[in-house]
Each structure stands twice: as C-alpha cells, then as structure tokens.
Image: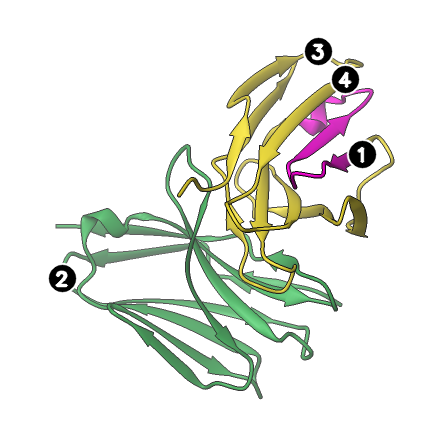
Amino acid sequence: GEDVEQSLFLSVREGDSSVINCTYTDSSSTYLYWYKQEPGAGLQLLTYIFSNMDMKQDQRLTVLLNKKDKHLSLRIADTQTGDSAIYFCAEKSGGYNKLIFGAGTRLAVHP
Amino acid sequence: DAGVTQSPTHLIKTRGQQVTLRCSPKSGHDTVSWYQQALGQGPQFIFQYYEEEERQRGNFPDRFSGHQFPNYSSELNVNALLLGDSALYLCASSRRGDQPQHFGDGTRLSIL
C-alpha cells in the first residue's frame, strides 16, 4: 500500500543542524520530495531526489535516501528562525504524478 | 514569471451548497493536480488533469469533479457540501505530468 510516515515535531537551536526523517512503503517510487509549508501558505518545493541516488546536496539542504530501508532524511545546516515551518515528505506513486504525503514535521527553531 | 495562482483565497459556504475553485498553472506547465489538506494533516490527492482529461483520481466521491481548459487552467467543483469538506484546497502544476509539482497558496474552504 501507499503510506508515508514522519515524526510530528522537531525543536532545534538556531545555528544547529536539523534532521527530519521520513519512511515510505512504495518500493516502486521513482521520485521523493521535500516540501515546506509556512503558516497560511501553500507548499514550497525544497528539493527532490531520484530513487537511483543516495544523496543530493543543495546549498544548506542535504537529502539522504536509503532505498533498502525505504528511509529518506532532510538535513538543514545552520538552521535559522526562518526555517521554522512544517516540512512534508512525499513520494511519487504510480505511473502518473500522484504524490503521497506524510502528515508533516513541525520544525521549531529557538535562539 | 507567475507561479501557480488560485482563487478565491477564502470561501465560506453552508452544507448542501456547491462551490467552484479556480487554478492557473505556472507558465509552461500543462498538468494540474488538486489536493485537499485537512487541518493538521498532509495533502490528499483528489485528481489530476492533462490535455483536458482526468488522468488519475484519488479516493474521493463523485461530488468532487473538475475541468481543465485549453489554456491549461483548471476548476475544482464540489457539490452537496458536507462539514467534512472544510479544508485547504491546493492546486499544483507540472510539466508533462512527470516533473516536480509546484503548488499555489490554496483556497481555504469553510463549511458552516
């Protein structure tokens, strides 16, 4: 079946690294995505990784994919207060572009 | 370069009414998907439109219907509104349907 799971809450100190974890069930997923949602807004595409990759780095963001364990993580280096938001992991499911989302991880950054 | 735009931003309806939400895709995109996001949850896929046809549908009743126009814009229609339809409705667009989806800011629908 299709299911994506995330921890619900993460609190970090400003300047530290944040690591948000996600597990998915569809082994045929070709792409996995990270989106950011700020209060009252839609979803902002942060980054994505193709299933044949292990890692992708994009400025302060690092995505790690363990396909054997169906585990995806997003590391944010030097976390800032502006990074406070809800982060969603999503997998592309099926032949078309249907996305299956987790429930989201709320990241709180404190001084 | 305008991103995905949705209208209206907020809407209040009563049970049993009908509603139409609108979406204009990002420039260069031809595929539109609709998602429902209930409070505190992740978005749930409703359906996807490509070449003016519904290409894929999630687990939503027939009360939810849509349309895509020749200019790639799209509408989501919901009939016989229920209290449980209260949610943020998100539109996402992509190119060819297999590229990353970009989302609008959504329409917040409240049912009284």
Q: Where is residue A25 drawn, in percent x and y?
A: 66, 73
Distance CA(mark 2)–CA(mark 1): 46 Å
| Residue A15: assigned label | 2
Q: Residues within 10 Å of mark 1 (few under 14, many from 20)?
A: some
Q: Colour of chain B?
A: yellow
Distance CA(mark 3)–CA(mark 1): 19 Å
Distance CA(mark 2)–CA(mark 4): 48 Å
Does A57 appear above or below A7?
below
Instruction: Answer with the quarter of the image where residue B73 lies.
Output: top right
Q: Give the residue number, with chain letter if any, for mark 3.
A: B14
Q: Which residues are magenta?
A: B65-85
Of circles 3 and 4, which is in front?
A: 4
Q: Where is residue A105 drawn, in percent x and y?
A: 43, 54
- The chain ID associated with circle 1 is B
Q: Give the residue number, with chain letter if any, for mark 4.
A: B18
| Secondary structure of residue under mark 2 | loop
Instruction: Answer with the quarter of the image where residue A59 lies.
Output: bottom left
Of circles 2 and 4, which is in front?
A: 4
Q: Give the residue number, with chain letter if any, for mark 1.
A: B65
